[in-house]
Amino acid sequence: MYYFLHKVILDNPVMDYLLVAASILLALFLKRYLSRYLAALIFRIIQRISSGVDKRSFINLVVSPLETFLLLLVSIVSIDELKFPRVLNFDLYKLSFHDLLEGLSTIVLIVTLFWLLLRIIDFVAMIIQQKSDQSLNPANNQLLVFFKDFFKVLLIIIGILMILKMAFHYRISNFITALSIGSAALALAFRESLENLIASFIIFFDKPFVTGDLVSVHNITGVVEKIGLRSTRIRSDQKTFVTVPNKQMVDSIMDNLTLRTQRRAFTQLELNSDTAPDLLNRFVLRVQQILEDKKDKVENCAVYLADISKNSFVLNIEYFTAPVPIADFYLTRQEINLAVITLMEEMQIKLAPFNTTTTLSSPAKNL
């Protein structure tokens, strides 16, 4: 037995192989318990920052990457204690097999670590979203989506730089210097994309509109469904899905219809010029009374004789309602229009006839 345990296979005694295998098996057996224990420790730190956090949701979110990270870490550290067999020490495309395995293990470990960090970002975003849902502020949700994606991209870039540094032994300083030199050319090449990115920051902080607002821009009217880093998605009143670059949303004249305080209705009547002045005056007063009788729907109103032409008296009817849904506004306008038509029939007031002009011309004489 002693001879077997000290027998050398691939430059390492059997006992060392058994110790490595035992370490990996122990890590495989205990990874669930260790990961849950570490997750609980991380949860205590997060709970101090923000109360009312669901522990089960956090543990379910981070346990899987934490288990993988712990198992890989123990496996790599245990295997690293073994001597690398000389028989496997060959070059592969000017790179030794040992360096290749070491680089791959480093890459896997870094990827697993950043997978865990991305899960933690998801959980923090979930906490903030729960708080924003309680505050009933849609602007918080759109900021959350933006910064969640932003920090994820930033974390991925840091992970790539760590892989270049630790796995490929690349000098990051040279890479950053080269990147800064090429950034000017990239800025020119992607000028429009950068403008849209800057415009997205303006939208998030200035808040001319938020998700769920009804807006009108570039002859497009619809509800904002998503504000991204490059463009804004709008569900139009035709139920189509329109994508507008953020730069145009900032630079163009945009009407946020959700923020209006009233809805305006305007009707113009061209009455027959044969209408007697007394009858016209009584008609104006009666129409004014119709609008005032609808105080529950009409907030402000005005009825006035706007103009006198050769063939008609121009009467303007203008009123404002609360910012009710469009269907309710149309119903109120229909009721008032029908009441005005009924009043015109009752008072025998007619609209001005349609003017047609006929021009007779004779052919030009040859001189």
Image (cartoon, rainbow, N blue to C red):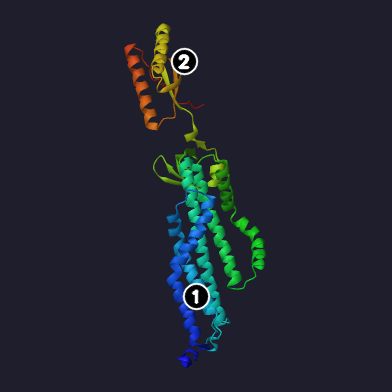
Tag count: 2
What is the three-letter code of the residue carrying label 2?
Tyr
Return the x and y of residue 181 as percentages of the image width and height.
Answer: 67, 62
Question: 336 or 220: nearer the eye?
Answer: 336
Image quadrant for the N terminus? bottom left
Residue 306: numbered disc: none
Question: 228 or 181: nearer the eye?
Answer: 228
Return the x and y of residue 55 as percentages of the image width and height.
Answer: 45, 54
Residue with the mark numbered 2: 304
Q: Is residue 20 left or right of residue 195?
A: left
How many residues crowd around disc 2 within 10 Å: few (fewer than 14), some, or many (20 or more)? Answer: some
What is the three-letter code of the residue carrying label 1?
Ser
Return the x and y of residue 236 as percentages of the image width and height.
Answer: 42, 41
SS category of the residue bearing label 2? strand
Return the x and y of residue 170 as percentages of the image width and height.
Answer: 62, 71
Give whichever of discs 1 and 2 has the lower sequence position: 1
Residue with the mark numbered 1: 75
